[in-house]
Amino acid sequence: MKRALAIVSCLAAGHAAAAGLFWGLVNVPESNVAMLALSAALALLVVFTVGWTEAAASLGWRADLTMGQAARRGLRAAPIVVAAAVVFALFWLLAAHAGVWLDAHGGEIDAWLIATFETSKTAWVHRVLDAVLFIVRYVVGVSAAVALLSAGARAGWRAVGRLAWIRAAFSRRQLGIVGAAMVLFVFLPLGAVYWHPQTIPANAVEILFVAVKLGTIYLLAQIGWALVLWAAARETA
């Protein structure tokens, strides 16, 4: 339990730091060479911070390492997050192109269903296809990315050329844990971002409510991501 709390804390602090650096990046006025250089430095620092956070949290699940050792090894493994991001981007683009194709041919799909099955109730088919695209993006894509990240954090860049992380990415156990964590701890809580009870008065109570709500959503997302990294760490051990 202490290890899990330490990993969730690492993720919460690291992601908050990366978000703060990104906020600084988007607010840099790129009006001269010095500002462009600052923007580039901040962009690299954002990537490094994210990479260090993910690598340290992934290594933190190793029983033979203390969190301090995981943090130090995470420094060297931070660049592996770039390869993991590329893997996730490939699945994202695949789902995006499939979504564009489905939108363009939605009428044809409906016409085929009506002609073949003699039913006009085709909305469920599109919902199923949307669910498949969601799974490709946020379950398979995330599973592949974290498997590569975990393997790379353990063995360095040479792990990228091995098949072990690919087998881990598509294992039923890891896909199941990743899918459950992403849905229960990330996407379902995100649905409450704009939720606001009408009974809350528009004063300091409302500000407190929003702060607690957003803080809870953020914490749940960190817990969910810790579970995702735990699943990958187990499969790539």
Image: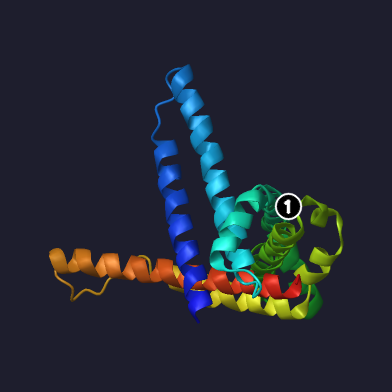
Name the secondary structure under disc 1.
helix
Left or right: where 198 falls relative to 5: left
Q: Quadrant of residue 213?
A: bottom left
Q: How is the image coloured?
A: rainbow
Residue 93's spot in the image, x, y percent? 70, 51
Where does the image place residue 50, in percent across and percent down from the top left?
Answer: 55, 52
Q: Is residue 108 above or below residue 119?
A: above
In percent of width and height, residue 85 lies at 66, 51
Residue 157, image x, y percentages: 77, 51
Position of 130 relative to 91 (above/below):
below
Local crowd at mark 1 within 10 Å, few (<14), some, or many (≥20)? some
Quadrant in the picture for the C terminus: bottom right
Note whether residue 125 is visible: no
Q: Quadrant of residue 212?
A: bottom left
Using the image as rendered, state which of residue 194 and residue 184 is in the foreground: 184
Outermost residue, top direction?
32
User: Splitting the image into 4 quarters, where does residue 235 fall?
Assistant: bottom right
Q: Is residue 127 left or right of residue 218?
A: right
Residue tagged by mark 1? 90
In this rendered view, identify the residue nearer to me: 130 or 35. 35
Kindly identify the residue that appears in the image at 66 percent across and 62 percent down: 137
Given residues 168 and 118, the one toward you in this image is 168
